[in-house]
Image: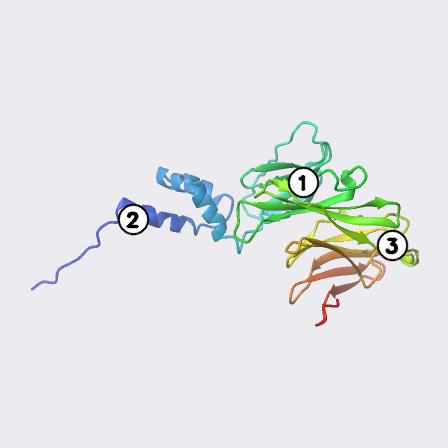
Amino acid sequence: MPASSHRPSPASPLEDDNLLPQILLRLPPDPSSLPRASLACTRWRDHVANPGFRRRFRLHHRRNPPLLGFFDGCGSLDFHPTLEAPERFSLKRDEGDGVRRPLGCRHGLVLLLVPKPLQVIVWDPVTGDQHRLDVPQGLTMNECYESVINGAVLRAAAGDAEHFKVVMVAADGDGVENRRAVACVYSSETGAWGGFVTAPIPYDADAHASGLFWRFSTSIYIDHAMLAGDSLYWQLIGNFEGILQFDLERQSLSVMSVPVPIYSKGNCFKLMRAEGGGGIGFLLMSNSDYIAQLWRRKTDSDGVA
């Protein structure tokens, strides 16, 4: 008796539609992947254009996103791609925006400061989405000039590709000795700014012995924030040389000193995540003898750093 041959029946359109999204999810997470896939046929375009699919696509690749490039400059925001096929990002500019100062990029979002009116822009370069937020009144005791504030943007939670948070910080007070740090958090989930969080900034009476800026009130340096663990960190420059920490979980603000004079003549200072175990660290380089020091902050069993 001859063996019967069996051919699998072709997949039904319903089965194919259930399998196709799983295949498309595994496309490379480059910005050009989904637009190119949408050109294949109508069915692919319908899947790719579905907001639910695009959300799953971002979640699927959230652990290993590609480095698309970096922005350079102020105002023009020139983009330098790292991919073979250059991506072009265009930020819509409103009349009267003036020079926009980038405050940093994180989790696929760019945060920009607009001086007039005093606002921040949260921009997703890939999708083109923009959110304009007024900087909250009262962030500083005096007029909130854009040169004395800084900020950072980040996704609200791991795996949440829709919501974001903005943390704005400032150093404020009267004179050199009476200074404080202030922070405020915006949540896209509530659509509102939270309350102000403050911390005193110490006055360093001996700063003139080593620092270059001891005559000036302590302010937050223009460098972008560094994220390590559950905290954001900024440099403090002026009479008090140190680091400003904002704990995202506890919603608390604190000021820490550094173990070496970081702004002496010829020194270069940069915050960084510490190697091995995470946490905060910094790179200190002397331009006079070209010696680099890597520092890492440790905490003992009693919680003393």
Q: Secondary structure at mark 3?
A: loop
Quadrant containing the C terminus is bottom right
Q: What residue is disc 2 on?
A: 15
Crowding at mark 1 (Cα within 10 Å: few <14, some 14-19, many 20+): many
38 lies above or below 178: above
Q: Where's the N terminus, which quadrant? A: bottom left
State the scheme by which the image is colored.
rainbow
- What residue is rendered at 60% in x and 37% in y? 131
In the rendered structure, which amino acid carries the disc numbered 3? Tyr
- Amino acid type at circle 2 is Glu
Disc 1 residue type (three-letter): Leu
Label 3 or label 1, whichever lies nearer to me, is 3
Q: Name the residue that disc number 3 marks.
A: 203
Q: Position of residue 237 (x, y in %)?
A: 82, 51
**Position of residue 146 measured from the top left corner of the image (x, y, whole percent):** 76, 39
- Furthest-top residue in view? 95
Circle 1 sits in a helix, a strand or a loop, which is it?
Answer: strand
Do the numbered discs 1 and 2 sit on residues whose CB atoms are within 8 Å?
no
Q: Which mark is residue 112?
A: 1
Q: Crowdedness of circle 3 by 10 Å Cα count: few (<14), some, many (20+)? A: some
Mark closest to the chain's N terminus, 3 or 1: 1
Q: Earlier in the sequence, mark 1 or mark 2?
A: 2
Give me the C-alpha separation between circle 1 and circle 2. 46 Å
